[in-house]
Amino acid sequence: MRSRLRLSPQTLRVLEAFLDDPKEWKYGYDISKTTGLKSGTLYPILMRLAERELLEASWETAEVGKPPRHMYRFTRNGLREALEVVRSRLKSRSQRTAFGGVKL
Amino acid sequence: MSHARSLASRLLSALARMSPSQSRPWADAMLRELDFVESDLGALRWALGSAGALFRHSVPHLWRLALGKRVPVVDVTFRELGTKTTGVLSGVAYAGALLFICVDGLARLVATVFASSTLGRVPLVECSVAFALPEAAFVATALALWRRQKAVSTGILLAGVILVAHLIVHFSKYGWLN
């Protein structure tokens, strides 16, 4: 059985970047710029998400003479999980705000 | 192409060739993205970060190969193993750098102070600089890092043990403080 995905703040940032436009393919460097994560942090997250089949990766069909780029987007399962995670985060954040930061 | 960008490109190309098959597409992906990094230093930083990520991704696969796949494949365990290996290697590298600084400092000290004076060399001082000082720093750093970075601490202690073993062999061969 696969262990639960480790949801570090960096992983959340990556998920949120993909959620901006879930159907669109995204490139590694563009995600790095959007999230502010360095390649050494970003790629392990992308690798983990791809290994768990939450992301699908594909090589862009390149123009002649140009090497192809690797791009990523959510799988159906990935999108569902990401939405659940973000919703639960928002819910817990709003609860904390509503109760003035008191732990329930 | 600047030196920094060329170095970054060569580093990632070499890693892409050497990576195990599972990591190769990722290495190629990182290499392709390099063309889109605007600044040359940024490209070098991109390559160095990517090298670290590739190393961490490749270590579990290399372990799996080394163990001949006799161990049940549990991704999480192998990933932890990769992280720990990186940590231990970082510790050893830190210890090596510190030892180099101490030995280099000793060589300069001997060259400037003792060579020009009539005192001659003082083996106890040399031994303290080249051995006691780094060993004390190793132990202090390892203790300070133990809770947060156990793997790095282990690497530092490992280097300390190697240094002690080296000195024991040295002294048993050449005699005490010669």
Image (cartoon, coloured by chain):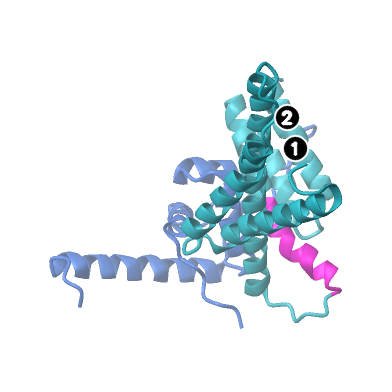
Question: For this rendering, which residue is in front, B69 or B35?
Answer: B69
**Placement of the C terminus of chain B among the 4 image quadrants:** top right
The amino acid on which the numbered mark 1 sits, given as a three-letter code, is Leu
**Placement of the N terminus of chain B among the 4 image quadrants:** top right
Q: Main secondary structure of the magenta part?
A: helix
Disc number at residue B7?
2
The amino acid on which the numbered mark 2 sits, given as a three-letter code, is Leu
- The image quadrant of residue B160 is bottom right
Disc number at residue B169?
none
Q: CA distance from mark 2 to mark 1?
A: 6 Å
**Residues at discs 2 and 1 in contact (Cβ within 8 Å):** yes
Q: Position of residue A63 (x, y in %)?
A: 74, 36
What is the chain letter for disc 2?
Answer: B
How many tags in the picture?
2
At 63% from the left and 51% from the top, the residue drawn is B90
Q: Is residue A35 magenta?
A: no
Would residue B63 be found to the left or right of residue A48 on screen? right
Q: Secondary structure at mark 2?
A: helix
Query: In this picture, which residue range is highlighted in magenta?
Result: B54-68
Dot 2 alpha-carbon crowd within 10 angstroms: few under 14, some 14 to 19, many 20 or more: some
Question: For this rendering, which residue is in front, B56 or A81?
Answer: B56
Colour of chain B, in one word, is cyan
Residue A67 can be seen in this image: no
**On the image, numbered disc 1 is attached to which residue?**
B11
Q: Position of residue A45 (x, y in %)?
A: 56, 58
Residue A92 can be seen in this image: yes
At 40% from the left and 69% from the top, the residue drawn is A85
